[in-house]
Image: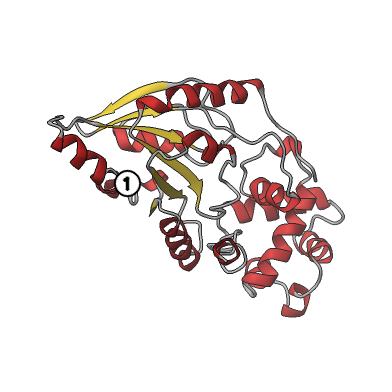
Amino acid sequence: MTIQWFPGHMAKARREVSEKMKYVDIVFELVDARLPLSSRNPMLDQIIQQKPRLVLLNKADLADPQQTRLWQDYFKKQGHSALAITAQESKGIKALIPAAKEALKEKRERDAARGIKPRAIRAMVLGIPNVGKSTLMNRLVGKKIAQTGNKPGVTKGQQWLRLGSELELLDTPGILWPKFEDEEIGKKLALTGAIKDQLVHLDDLAIYGLDFFARYYPGRITERYNISENQEQKLGSELLMDITAKRGYKDDYERGSEVVVFDIRQGKLGRYTLDRYEEVGQEEHE
């Protein structure tokens, strides 16, 4: 499943982000807590460079809490502050401004020594589509100011938002890399809804998701779909056939795939993290 998707507005957004980086003090990089690495944009490191960064692991209520803690430590070891939040329910949002102040502590101390009076922190919110940027900004401001939706790429414009006296935010459209070199990353993103369903095959995603849960969260498929433990140990393709039949869909595997994919997205198989720290995070530190 090779996915190539680089709409014109995303190329434009990359230029705008690069041009406006000089106006901000810190970057809020929003990632999906279920895939903290796969939902990052590789271009961002080139764009942000040495600018202070606060990594926000959003949708933490859907992610495996133990894995989330490990990934927070991972980002901190890289020199970035990291917070786990759930923007939809405003969880963790209050810690954002104190964390930003801490990340900018040295800069603000240098400014104070030079006689520069403190002003509101200017931040830029960056992330790929569908990680929850608009929802986060709506929660920060306390009213609906940015269009939200569960489809990738609903934010098209760019706007400054003032949040009291302490924070000013620059919203930017989502940016996605032009090609998914790693097929598994594409599947992970598609499974969480970061890629439009029209661009993928739901049966591929359902099989990938079932194989993943059978490996890392045994028992959950059995519990959700009322099948035997022996069935859960089958290959994802066979498991999908069993679930489809169990639901009474006969040979309608497309319908069965849709059920499985949306159950996973909505957390009906429990909290999970697709990027496993023990497999990815430790390798990058070696």
Judge the density around disc 1: few (<14), some (14-19), many (≥20) Cα neighbours within 10 Å. Answer: some
Q: Which quadrant of the view contains residue 227?
A: bottom right
Q: Seen in the image, is 160 located left or right of residue 198?
A: left
Residue of label 1: 93
Residue 266 in the image: above or below residue 123 = below
Question: 218 or 44, which is in the foreground?
Answer: 44
In percent of width and height, residue 254 lies at: 80, 48
Q: Which quadrant of the view contains residue 124?
A: top left
In percent of width and height, residue 202 lies at: 76, 47
Q: Which quadrant of the view contains residue 9?
A: top right
In percent of width and height, residue 71 lies at: 48, 60
What residue is drawn where x is 62% and y is 24%? 11
Q: Seen in the image, is 263 located left or right of residue 33?
A: right
What residue is drawn where x is 68% and y is 71%? 215
Q: How is the image coloured?
A: secondary structure
Q: Seen in the image, is 277 located left or right of residue 85?
A: right
Q: Secondary structure at mark 1?
A: helix
Residue 192 in the image: above or below residue 67 = above
Query: In this rendering, does residue 262 appear at all?
Result: yes
In percent of width and height, residue 286 lies at: 57, 66
Q: Residue furthest right?
A: 251
Query: In this rendering, does residue 84 appear at all?
Result: no
Question: 138 or 99, which is in the foreground?
Answer: 99
Residue flagged by tag 1: what amino acid is it? Ile
What residue is drawn where x is 48% and y is 31%? 148
Question: 276 or 246, which is in the foreground?
Answer: 276
Residue 9 in the image: above or below residue 139 = above
Q: Residue furthest front?
A: 114
